[in-house]
């Protein structure tokens, strides 16, 4: 059976080592943890989320993580689904919370945080930082410019070792590669 591959449509608004309130400019440290079944009750299309995170969490080949502000774990800022492949990490889905999308977003830096976490996972699994994903055509140049990703045919992109290392060192300062 063919794998379902979403074309990712996230915007890297800023590469910060935290998330930043777009109104006040205040920065908030973040943490990444596994998404749980109990989290799913607040992650619904009715509440503005675009993807079926139930499906992602139910797929045993995928790992799903949530981004929250330190000391405020009940408010999910963003989500990412990854698959740990034999030689890289594949980003299946990435979504910022509905209140973190568009011109009136509350926080900047959510997508950058989630991508950095995927890069970190790749190093932890001895995959030299390689992270692959499928991009929407209109965002390929954006991902090349902001993430240092390479476009290698069709909609496929990969973040190589050096670009991954930069992301991990920026977001996880205490954890040098």
Image (spheres, rainbow, N blue to C red):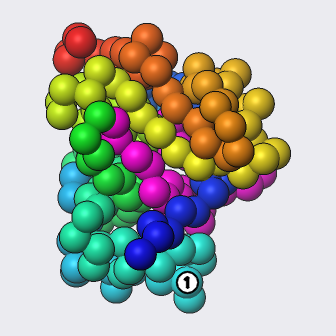
Left or right, 82 with reference to 149: left
Q: Residues within 10 Å of mark 1 (few under 14, many from 20)?
A: few
Magenta-highlighted residues: 88-113
Q: Position of residue 176 (x, y in %)?
A: 23, 11
Front residue (pair 52, 47): 52
Left or right, 97 with reference to 122: right
Q: Residue at x 34, y 24 (%)?
A: 129
Front residue (pair 168, 135): 135
Left or right, 143 with reference to 63: right
Figure check: 174 above or below 60: above
Q: Secondary structure at mark 1?
A: helix
The C terminus - image quarter = top left
* Image-quadrant location for residue 100: bottom right
Asked if residue 101 lies in the magenta stretch, the reply is yes
> What residue did someone put label 1 on?
45
The N terminus - image quarter = bottom left
Q: Residue at x 76, y 30 (%)?
A: 141
Q: How many marks?
A: 1
* Image-quadrant location for residue 61: bottom left
Q: Is residue 42 visible?
A: yes
Q: Position of residue 103 (x, y in %)?
A: 77, 51
Figure check: 69 above or below 28: below
Q: Residue at x 53, y 62 (%)?
A: 5
């Amino acid at each position: 059976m063919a794998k379902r591959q979403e074309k990712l449509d996230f915007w890297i608004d800023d590469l910060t080592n935290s998330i930043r309130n777009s109104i006040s400019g205040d920065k908030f440290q973040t943490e990444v943890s596994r998404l749980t079944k109990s989290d799913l009750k607040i992650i619904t299309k009715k509440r503005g989320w675009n993807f079926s995170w139930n499906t992602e969490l139910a797929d045993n080949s995928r790992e799903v993580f949530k981004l929250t502000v330190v000391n405020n774990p009940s408010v999910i800022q963003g989500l990412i689904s990854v698959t740990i492949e034999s030689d890289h990490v594949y980003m299946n889905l990435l979504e910022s919370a509905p209140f973190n999308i568009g011109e009136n977003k509350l926080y900047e830096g959510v997508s950058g945080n989630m991508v950095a976490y995927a890069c970190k996972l790749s190093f932890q699994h001895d995959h030299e930082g390689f992270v692959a994903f499928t991009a929407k055509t209109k965002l390929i140049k954006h991902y090349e410019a902001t993430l240092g990703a390479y476009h290698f045919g069709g909609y496929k992109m990969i973040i190589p070792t050096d670009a991954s290392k930069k992301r991990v060192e920026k977001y996880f300062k205490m954890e040098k590669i």
